[in-house]
């Protein structure tokens, strides 16, 4: 089942890539059909997922490179499953949203026309790898997807991005490669540790029970953590994100920030915590500090941005701070909240980037001061932008509120000061979102936006599902939480942390 | 040698196992036939007969190697102990033969221009004599026997079980290469400069090698690797003669593979030599040199490893970092690949330093993986051409991805393999040597390795940026496809994919080849 989920988009990518020249429409349709099929399959799988069952389900395991002890092993727990769902839902929407993007190359200026089918083939390849990276239960396999994933994204940014695209693409690739290579050293050492313990393996299940000497574990933790912190991105490692997201075509930015970066936080939760619980606890103060810095720093910088896409990128840095805060708070609420946050942030930022993409495509500029008073000219566009923005500032009733609240409560029960400082992030979020809305949408329509089209049917179809999901998960997050909770409990067992004695607040939010 | 007894004027002829030496003998025999062809066949027929002889010679030698490897587990010495026939050696020889076949495809290339080689090497560049020979359409067909001699030397070098045989092999492989380097058709002065440089430095390093051999003979009373090893374990390892001998010998060996600080020749020679020859040197010579290093350090100096390891650590670190850092500033695509090859030499050394079976097998695998990718990459370089020959300057490659997506895509793929991105053979190889190094206790070396891989990735990616994200120049280079170089590219690309995605069989082969170590 999981293999099919990986194989279908991969084969689709090949198919699209080898379509004859000039059949652009066919390429787009093929990509859409393939991604929809994958989405349906994944949803069917999610329905079949047994929340009370064993941790990893839909598992498959075959030898891949026996000489290295490498398996092709896939399987999902609740955390991985919700992230896969996030990916498969976003990708078809991105395909639809970037229907005309490849020709226009991100909408900024007018670079020469670029190959349409290559763009969609790269998107499909990316989808295959995104699913693979979340599904892998063999660390070598995870690493392969983790690194290979960079290549399609690199080409998407570099070939279809904005004016500074090649700089942004290279920066993105080099940062990620550097982190990845450090992780490679850690992966190898981990294997050697297991081999010295008698049985060399890359399987997550087996490595989980491996006893590692504390000093080594700290180094290994660092190897993994730096890679994930670059990916996520956590504050000192974040400088690539605004460039990459700002230059990527809007559709790719959705996947970059919405899904690819989640691999970082997912990796922290899955690998850093469970493989090196002792080291994780040792490093917790550092990570919490970085997270809090990230929350405030990202938010403050977001306020100062003059480019819409860069602004959204900085808000994401702030949000990733919340996610790592929740993960390293080491409480069930914090981690469940963080996982839900990953999903919600994917949809919320996805929505923001999508609407921003529509805006930019209309105006041909991504600068905030290029807009003004759009509300009057294109009410639907402005409305969806507002809802997406409000989800970004975690308005109650939207799903992001649930997760942010969970994270903060979960952190507060153990670490009061970081939680209090983090709360300021919510206030700052209101500033950057609403101020951006005010500058672009409200007020009298300027001549710059005169004659701007409102959302087309295609664009409505793209944005509606995301907004619906944001609202539905905001009022009824239970299915997602039920899926996530058992897996997080396992992590908690592994790090040997127990939730602090329940406070009054706990009753209300425990599903 | 000890069995060659000179008694009462009669010499007992030594016993030679012709069957086991056949691959070497076939290649050298084909080279000799090539020389005869030059002497007796008239000019119009020479090219085809030379190509035929070389092709047949290499293929037969390769098949013979395979048969020897499959039929029984080889683990013995031949030719009175001068040549070792064992798993690792056969693997290395097989690799060299396949890579030589691919390089032969480039050497025999005639579609791009009459030949990649100058019409008459003796004519001074820019003179009437040179023009005459060009107009006459003379083809330089001596390159084929020269190449076969070089390949023959490369086959003996990693198999040589005593230092004298090794020295002879070193000369047999080097001398033809010095010549071949000077035969480029375009940019002849650069080519001749490369040849002279290579010759002078090569002769110098050979002298080091020979001096080291002499000192080791003084120490052990024999040039046999196994005798040296025995002497080391008996006499202890702190003799000045021994240490000086090992040091000098290492200089000679490290020079051939181009490890820092003996790497200065590599960029100049790779740049100046005809690209087909560069491909041969970058693949076969490297494989052979590393094979020789493996044998000397795993057999001869194995018991001394606590003494040579720190030095090799330093050499490996220097090689990786220097190759990666200096490559960043290169603007000539061949020079860039030369520095990349230096950096890869450093990665190979991390496998050598592991001194365990995993180290041996992973180094073998790395050699094969790197060789295929390299020949493929150089084959592409021969195909991208300007009016004045190959488009060597990187700026000329700008926008190639827009005009020739398939070719540029393949080149990008090779570069990603050099950078060690997963699902390419480069990643599998790097993973293998790093894993061996970590289990051999060389974790810091691996950290340096991954950091320099990250640095190296920068300049590989730069070329990809140039090809795909820059706009093509109006008078950009043309891409000339020809059946032979295309075959080399396709084989290289296939091997890079297969060894990256399903490396199991090849790794198994390398492991079973390394299972018995070198014969002593």
Image (spheres, coloured by chain):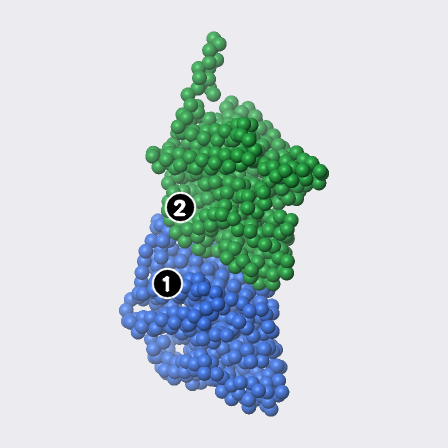
Indicate the chain on which mark 1 is placed. A
- Is residue B34 something one can see in this rendering? yes
Q: Which chain is disc 2 placed on? A: B
Q: Secondary structure at mark 1?
A: helix
Q: Residue at x 51, y 40 (%)?
A: B104
Chain A's colour?
A: blue
Q: Which residue is mark 2?
A: B507
Q: Nearer the viewer, residue A481 or B484?
A: B484
Quadrant in which the N terminus of chain A appears:
bottom left
Q: Residue at x 44, y 49 (%)?
A: B495
Query: Residue placed at 60% from the left, 58% from the top?
Result: B398
Q: Residues within 10 Å of mark 1 (few under 14, many from 20)?
A: some
Find residue B405 and report its horizontal and vertical position in percent: 52, 59
From the top left corner, tell me how far across and down residue B352 is, in percent. Answer: 48, 41
Q: Is residue B466 above or below residue A330?
A: above
- Disc 1 designates what residue? A7
Mark in front: 1 vs 2 = 1
Residue B487 horizontal/vertical position (percent): 47, 47
Residue furthest to the top in view is B8
Q: Which chain identifier belongs to the green chain?
A: B
Q: Residues within 10 Å of mark 2 (few under 14, many from 20)?
A: many
Give the residue at x 48% y 31%: B30
| Residue B399 image position (x, y, % from top left) | 59, 60
């Amino acid at each position: 089942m999981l293999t099919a989920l990986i194989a279908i988009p991969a084969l689709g990518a090949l198919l699209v890539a080898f379509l004859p020249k000039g059949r652009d429409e066919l390429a787009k349709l093929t990509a859409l059909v393939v991604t929809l099929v994958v989405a349906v399959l994944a949803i069917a799988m999610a329905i079949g997922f047994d929340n009370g069952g064993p941790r990893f389900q839909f598992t498959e395991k075959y030898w891949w490179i026996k000489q290295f002890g490498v398996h092709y092993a896939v399987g999902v727990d609740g955390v991985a499953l919700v992230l896969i769902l996030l990916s498969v839902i976003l990708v078809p929407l991105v395909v639809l949203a970037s229907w005309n993007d490849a020709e226009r190359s991100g909408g900024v200026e007018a670079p020469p026309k670029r190959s349409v089918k290559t763009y969609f083939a790269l998107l499909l390849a990316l989808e295959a790898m995104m699913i693979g990276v979340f599904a892998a239960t063999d660390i070598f396999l995870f690493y392969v997807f983790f690194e290979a994933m960079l290549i399609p994204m690199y080409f998407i940014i570099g070939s279809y991005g904005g004016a500074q695209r090649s700089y942004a693409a290279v920066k993105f690739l080099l940062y990620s490669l550097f982190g990845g290579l450090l992780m490679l050293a850690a992966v190898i050492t981990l294997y050697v540790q297991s081999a010295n313990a008698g049985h060399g393996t890359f399987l997550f299940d087996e490595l989980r029970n491996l006893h590692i000497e504390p000093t080594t574990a700290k180094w290994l933790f660092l190897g993994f953590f730096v890679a994930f912190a670059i990916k996520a991105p956590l504050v000192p490692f974040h400088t690539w994100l605004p460039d990459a997201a700002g230059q990527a075509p809007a559709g790719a930015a959705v996947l970059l920030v919405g899904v690819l970066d989640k691999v970082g936080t997912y990796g922290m939760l899955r690998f850093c915590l469970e493989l090196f619980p002792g080291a994780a606890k040792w490093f917790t103060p550092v990570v919490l500090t970085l997270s809090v810095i990230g929350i405030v720093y990202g938010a403050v910088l977001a306020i100062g941005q003059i480019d819409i896409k860069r602004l959204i990128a900085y808000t994401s840095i702030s949000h990733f701070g919340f996610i790592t805060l929740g993960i390293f708070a080491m409480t069930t609420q914090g981690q469940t909240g963080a996982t839900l946050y990953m999903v919600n942030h994917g949809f919320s930022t996805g929505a923001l980037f999508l609407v921003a993409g529509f805006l930019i495509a209309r105006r041909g500029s991504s600068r905030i001061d290029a807009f003004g008073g759009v509300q009057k000219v294109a009410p639907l566009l402005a409305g969806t932008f507002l809802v997406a923005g409000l989800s970004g500032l975690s308005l109650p009733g939207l799903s992001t509120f649930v997760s942010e609240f969970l994270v903060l409560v979960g952190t507060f029960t153990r670490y009061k000061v970081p939680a209090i400082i983090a709360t300021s992030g919510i206030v700052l979020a209101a500033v950057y979102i609403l101020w951006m809305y005010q500058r672009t949408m409200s007020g009298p329509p300027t001549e710059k936006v005169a004659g701007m089209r409102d959302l087309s049917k295609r664009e409505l179809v793209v944005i509606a599902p995301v907004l619906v999901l944001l609202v539905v998960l905001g009022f009824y997050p239970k299915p997602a939480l039920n899926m996530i909770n058992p897996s997080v409990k396992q992590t908690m067992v592994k790090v040997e942390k127990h939730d602090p004695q329940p406070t009054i607040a706990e009753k209300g939010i425990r599903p | 040698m000890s069995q060659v007894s000179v008694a009462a004027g009669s010499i007992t002829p030594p016993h030679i196992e012709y069957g086991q030496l056949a691959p070497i003998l076939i290649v050298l025999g084909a080279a000799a036939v090539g020389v005869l062809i030059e002497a007796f066949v008239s000019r119009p027929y020479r090219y085809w007969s030379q190509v035929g002889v070389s092709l047949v010679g290499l293929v037969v030698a390769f098949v013979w190697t395979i048969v020897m490897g499959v039929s029984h587990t080889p683990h013995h010495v031949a030719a009175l102990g001068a040549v070792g026939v064992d798993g690792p050696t056969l693997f290395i020889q097989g690799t060299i033969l396949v890579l030589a076949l691919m390089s032969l495809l480039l050497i025999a290339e005639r579609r791009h221009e009459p030949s990649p080689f100058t019409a008459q090497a003796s004519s001074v560049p820019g003179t009437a004599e040179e023009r005459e020979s060009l107009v006459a359409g003379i083809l330089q067909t001596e390159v084929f026997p020269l190449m076969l001699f070089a390949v023959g030397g490369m086959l003996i070098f990693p198999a040589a079980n005593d230092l004298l045989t090794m020295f002879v092999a070193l000369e047999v492989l080097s001398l033809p290469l010095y010549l071949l380097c000077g035969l480029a058709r375009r940019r002849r002065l650069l080519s001749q400069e490369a040849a002279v440089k290579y010759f002078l430095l090569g002769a110098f390093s050979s002298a080091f090698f020979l001096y080291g051999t002499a000192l080791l003979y003084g120490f052990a009373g024999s040039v046999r690797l196994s005798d040296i090893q025995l002497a080391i374990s008996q006499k202890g390892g702190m003799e000045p003669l021994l240490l000086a001998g090992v040091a000098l010998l290492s200089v000679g060996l490290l020079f051939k593979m181009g490890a820092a600080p003996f790497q200065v020749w590599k960029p100049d020679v790779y740049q100046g030599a005809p690209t087909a020859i560069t491909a041969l040197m970058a693949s076969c010579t490297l494989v052979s040199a590393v094979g020789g290093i493996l044998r000397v350090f795993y057999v001869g100096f194995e018991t001394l490893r606590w003494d040579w390891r720190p030095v090799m650590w330093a050499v490996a670190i220097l090689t990786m970092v220097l190759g990666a850092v200096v490559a960043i500033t290169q603007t000539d695509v061949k020079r860039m690949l030369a520095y990349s090859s230096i950096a890869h030499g450093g990665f190979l050394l991390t496998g050598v330093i592991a001194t365990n079976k995993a180290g041996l097998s992973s180094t073998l695998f790395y050699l094969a993986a790197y060789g295929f990718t390299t020949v493929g990459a150089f084959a592409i370089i021969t195909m991208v051409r300007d009016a004045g020959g190959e488009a060597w300057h990187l700026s000329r490659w700008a926008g190639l991805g827009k005009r020739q997506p398939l070719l540029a895509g393949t080149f990008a793929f090779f570069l990603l393999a050099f950078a060690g991105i997963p699902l390419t053979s480069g990643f599998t190889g790097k993973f293998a040597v790093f894993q061996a190094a970590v289990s051999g206790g060389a974790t810091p070396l691996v950290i340096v390795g991954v950091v320099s891989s990250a640095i190296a990735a920068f300049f590989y990616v730069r070329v990809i940026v140039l090809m795909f994200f820059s706009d093509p120049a109006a008078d950009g280079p043309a891409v000339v496809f020809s059946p032979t170089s295309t075959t080399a590219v396709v084989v290289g690309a296939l091997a890079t994919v297969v060894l990256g995605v399903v490396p199991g069989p090849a790794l198994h082969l390398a492991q079973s080849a390394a299972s018995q170590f070198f014969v002593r």
